[in-house]
């Protein structure tokens, strides 16, 4: 029987799910878990398909203002192969200006994980707006945001579908050649911020051995590259102790999963 409860605001009561025993709750959880696992596998398959999307060459030159001065789209990569650019609305005419950026874009900014984890996977994340750098610096300090944030100075936003709405573009650098590899906006864009969500939209993915990626793509053992955000060292071998810990954890997980199937 479905239970009801007052909403605490004097409005209509809400219908709550039934309250059951521990055994019944665990049975319901196992049943839902089957669908959740299927959802995870479908998400992985979709990410694998993204890694096989065709690329579009970026032939036009673009310029941005950064704390260090005028820079190019190529400079935004900071020497890495992958670049993710989120178009955040912070400029004259935007609700909240000049004290705040757009509320939705600000929520996205609040969710961004430490960029060191993306950098460790050869990926750079950049926010881009039309506000001057002085305003962006003031906003970042006020809100505690640390991701790179540049000023758009030309038609970059218009050319890449983010002149009237937020969106995330992904690029790949091969030497000095740049390619657009992916784009997401609307509901697909609102869930960005986590390291895994960002990596899953890049052409190289998470770069772990379990992923279904085209031949020759960089891949390293699962979990082993993970680190504290202040401890990444370029080209360093995984810490041996962490390898032991992660191996033991994975083995225990697989043993428990095998029991659940028997």
Image: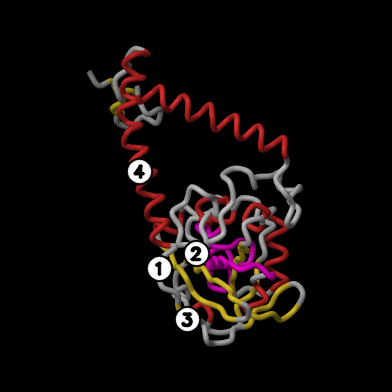
Examine the rendered structure and indicate whether residue 60 appears above or below residue 131.
below
At numbered mark 4, what does the secondary structure look like: helix, strand or loop?
helix
Dot label at residue 159: 3
Residue drawn 48% across the image and 47% down it: 210
Residue drawn 65% across the image and 67% down it: 80
Marks 1 and 4, how far apart in space? Answer: 21 Å
Quadrant location of the N terminus? top left
Residue drawn 37% across the image and 52% down it: 45
In the rendered view, does 134 fall on the left or right side of 256? Answer: right
Dot label at residue 45: none
| Dot 3 and dot 2 residues touching (CB under 8 Å) | no
Residue placed most toward the observer, 56 or 18: 56
Q: Is residue 54 visible?
A: yes
Marks 1 and 2, how far apart in space? Answer: 8 Å
Quadrant location of the C terminus? top left
The mark that comes first in sequence, 4 or 3, is 4
- Place of residue 54 in the rendered image (x, y in percent of width and height, measured from the top left): 41, 73
Magenta range: 78-105
| Dot 1 and dot 2 residues touching (CB under 8 Å) | yes
Instruction: Decide: few, some or many residues near mark 3? Use Cα within 10 Å; few <14, some 14-19, many ≥20.
Output: few
Q: Which residue is mark 1?
A: 53
Q: Which residue is mark 2?
A: 203
Examine the rendered structure and indicate whether residue 257 appears above or below residue 143.
above
Marks 3 and 1, how far apart in space? Answer: 19 Å
Of badges 3 and 1, nearer the viewer stands 1
Marks 4 and 3, how far apart in space? Answer: 34 Å
In the rendered view, does 103 fall on the left or right side of 245? Answer: left
Residue 28 is inside the magenta segment: no
- Place of residue 174 in the rendered image (x, y in percent of width and height, measured from the top left): 58, 76
Q: Which residue is mark 4?
A: 39
Instruction: Decide: few, some or many residues near mark 1? Use Cα within 10 Å; few <14, some 14-19, many ≥20.
Output: few
- Place of residue 195 in the rendered image (x, y in percent of width and height, measured from the top left): 57, 51
């Amino acid at each position: 029987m479905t239970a009801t409860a007052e909403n605490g605001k004097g409005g209509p009561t809400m219908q709550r799910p039934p309250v059951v025993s521990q055994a019944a709750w665990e049975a319901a959880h196992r049943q839902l878990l089957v669908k959740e696992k299927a959802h995870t596998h479908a998400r992985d398959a979709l990410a694998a398909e993204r890694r096989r999307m065709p690329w579009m060459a970026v032939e036009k030159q673009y310029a941005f203002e950064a704390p260090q001065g005028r820079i190019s789209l190529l400079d935004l990569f900071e020497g890495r192969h992958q670049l993710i650019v989120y178009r955040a609305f912070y400029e004259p005419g935007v609700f909240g200006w000049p004290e705040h950026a757009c509320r939705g874009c600000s929520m996205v900014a609040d969710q961004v994980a430490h960029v060191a984890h993306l950098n460790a996977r050869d990926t750079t994340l950049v926010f881009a707006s039309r506000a001057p750098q002085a305003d962006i610096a003031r906003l970042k300090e006020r809100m505690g945001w640390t991701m790179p944030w540049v000023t758009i100075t030309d038609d970059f936003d218009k050319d890449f579908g983010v002149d009237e709405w937020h969106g995330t573009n992904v690029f790949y650098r091969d030497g000095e050649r740049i390619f657009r590899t992916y784009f997401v906006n609307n509901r697909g864009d609102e869930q960005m911020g986590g390291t895994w969500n960002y990596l899953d939209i890049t052409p190289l993915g998470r770069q772990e051995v379990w992923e279904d990626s085209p031949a020759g793509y960089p891949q390293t053992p699962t979990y082993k590259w993970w680190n504290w955000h202040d401890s990444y060292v370029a080209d360093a071998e995984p810490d041996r102790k962490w390898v032991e810990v992660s191996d033991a954890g994975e083995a225990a997980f697989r043993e428990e999963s095998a029991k659940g199937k028997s």
